[in-house]
């Protein structure tokens, strides 16, 4: 089609470079899930409230439903698939910090960033970081315990 508004963008996702044909209005979440097949980031509210779609952009948590794919060019994007065998994943399993699992990938990505950026966290720091994600199935106590356990593990590395 001559008027197709698609163009190629180069995205660095999970330490691999992907060239993807996108429309200007394609969200990063859509491109990650549909175009690249990385389905760990979940569509929830699609308006930035729930955090199920959280990814890291240059190490900072970002809700991928609110970011255009074209904005990701030139940035390092990390999805849940890029966090294999991390201290936060092990801690989530050990502390049973999940229930249905739908929100878990967003929490893991957000909590991974927290563990990377903070060496210790009191209740206020934990609350501030965790308020960006919503879990409708369980409380946040186990998630907080997982973050603290991952921080302890990071001290030993």
Image: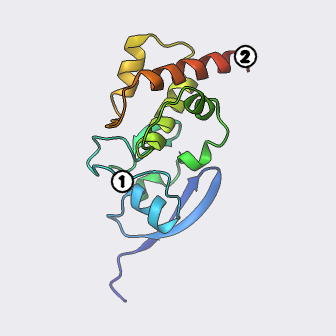
Residue 66, how many percent across, how many down? 32, 49
Query: Relative to residue 104, is residue 88 depicted above or below?
Result: above
Query: Relative to residue 43, is residue 123 depicted above or below?
Result: above
Q: In which quarter of the image is the N terminus?
A: bottom left
Q: In which quarter of the image is the C terminus?
A: top right
Whether residue 78 is visible: no
Q: How crowded is mark 2: few (under 14 residues within 10 Å), some or many (20 or more)?
A: few
Residue drawn at 50 percent across, 26 percent down: 114
Residue 59, how many percent across, how many down? 53, 36
Task: From the viewer's perspective, tell me whether residue 63 is left or right of residue 10.
Answer: left
Residue 129, how many percent across, how many down? 40, 25
Q: Nearer the viewer, residue 143 or 1?
A: 143
Q: Please, which colouring scheme is shown?
A: rainbow
Q: Nearer the viewer, residue 90 or 28?
A: 90
Label located before the other in sequence (1 or 2)? 1
Residue to which mark 2 is pinned: 156
Residue drawn at 54 percent across, 17 percent down: 148
Q: Is mark 2 on a helix, strand or loop?
A: loop
In the orientation shown, which residue stands out farthest toward the bottom? Answer: 1
Residue drawn at 46 percent across, 21 percent down: 144
Query: Relative to residue 141, is residue 45 depicted above or below?
Result: below
Residue to which mark 1 is pinned: 43
Residue drawn at 39 percent across, 25 percent down: 140
Q: Residues within 10 Å of mark 1 (few under 14, many from 20)?
A: many
What is the CA distance from the residue labelled 1 to the residue labelled 2?
35 Å
């Amino acid at each position: 089609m001559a008027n197709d508004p698609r163009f190629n963008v180069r995205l660095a996702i999970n330490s691999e470079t992907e060239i993807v044909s996108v429309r200007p209005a394609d969200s990063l979440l859509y491109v990650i899930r549909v175009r690249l097949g990385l389905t760990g980031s979940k569509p929830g509210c699609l308006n930035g409230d729930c955090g199920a779609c959280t990814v890291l952009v240059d190490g900072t948590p970002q809700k991928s439903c609110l970011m255009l794919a074209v904005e990701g060019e030139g940035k390092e994007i990390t999805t849940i698939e890029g966090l294999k065998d991390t201290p936060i994943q092990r801690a989530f399993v050990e502390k049973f910090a999940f229930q249905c699992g739908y929100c878990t990938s967003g929490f893991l990505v957000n909590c991974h960033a927290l563990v990377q950026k903070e060496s210790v966290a009191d209740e206020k720091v934990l609350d501030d970081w965790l308020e960006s994600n919503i879990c409708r199935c369980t409380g946040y106590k186990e998630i907080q315990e997982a973050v603290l356990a991952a921080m302890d593990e990071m001290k030993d590395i």
